[in-house]
Image: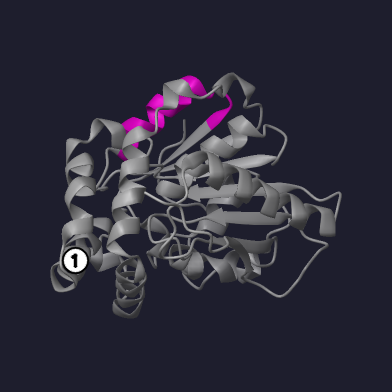
Amino acid sequence: MIATFRPLQLIACTPATPSRPLFVFLPGMDGSGVLLQPQVAGLSSGFDIHCLSIPPDDLKGWDELTEQVAALIRMEQQRHPGRTTTVCGESFGGCLALKLITRFPNLCDRLILVNPASSAQRQPWIGACSSVTHLLPAPIYHLSALSLCNLLIASHRVSRPTRLQLLAAMQAVRPQSAAWRMALLTKFRLEDLPLDRVHQPVLILASEADRLLPSQREAKRLAGFLPNTTIVLLPDSGHACLLEDQLNLSAILQSQNLCPELLVSTLPMGAPAQPAGLYW
């Protein structure tokens, strides 16, 4: 495959607030950052939030993605030096975050992994899908995206407009790119990374009702490689947990003292001060 040359971008999700810590979100397979949108309001009082945007026809490999994303983060850090940086990776973006922090161990101060897809190599269905997805006619591909969307979420916890946004983002990714990203996941091996270089505190959110990947088991496996790790188990959440109305990422960060700058008054009405779940 020939890699495309369309640029990756870091998109600002909030008005420029250089006095606040930098928060960089690395999205899942859709590459759009839709999964973070329900959490932006709660996070905005404590962070200057940027989201990585991956073009829907992107065919970059892990090394090129890692190098370019690190360069984008450094550019943002250089614009406003001296502030801390939190990198948050969800699913596919969780694997990218692990590549980043092991390749550039001083790039960020905190790492958040949300149902990272680091177990994909052990899921035979992902390899099978990667080998056929690029061959699918457009109508079949769109139907398959709908089926996958239903697996990604706990539908009773995600509003209909948000479900439609997720589906549109997934269908915008070209079949060749979807197949390529799944193939990248099948090549991702945690054991090949120099994880002893990771000194930052790591927070892992693991959904117990994840129907796509064994996220709870994988979180515990990751903690075996990363000793400075806290796991928050989400008992009723699906894989795309950040889309859920009941999930409050800012409350989770406050409960773990990861961002004292967050204001309680910005939390959504009815959101718990501390999320339900177990801590490891």
223 within the magenta span: yes
Q: Is residue 122 left or right of residue 2?
A: left
Against 213, residue 5 (above or below) is below
Q: Colour mode?
A: one colour
Compared to residue 132, the image places residue 158 above or below, namely below
Q: Residue at x 24, y 63 (%)?
A: 149
Q: Is residue 38 visible?
A: yes
Left or right of residue 149, residue 203 in this image: right
Residue plotted at (17% across, 43% down): 128
Could you tell me residue 177's position as x and y percent? 35, 57
Is there any visible trace of residue 204 in the rendered image?
A: no
Residue 178: which quarter of the image? bottom left
Residue 207 is situated, as x and y percent measured from the top left of the image, at 34, 46
Q: Give the structural element (helix, strand or loop) at label 1.
A: helix
Compared with 11, 192 (above or below) is: above
| Residue holding disc 1 | 141
Please name the predominant secondary structure of the magenta segment in the image. Answer: helix
Q: Residues within 10 Å of mark 1 (few under 14, many from 20)?
A: some
Residue furthest to the front in view is: 2
Question: Residue 75 sits in which quadrant?
Answer: bottom right
Task: Give the residues in magenta.
Answer: 215-229
**Which of 274 and 44 lies nearest the eye of the viewer?**
44
How many tags in the picture?
1
Which of 170/258 is in front?
170
Q: Residue at x 27, y 42 (%)?
A: 213
Where residue 120 appears, as percent x and y from the top left, is: 30, 37
Report the amino acid beneath label 1. Tyr
- Asked if the magenta segment contains residue 269, the reply would be no
Q: Position of residue 39 (x, y in %)?
A: 51, 65
Taking the spot 23% from the left edge, 57% from the top edge, the residue there is 134
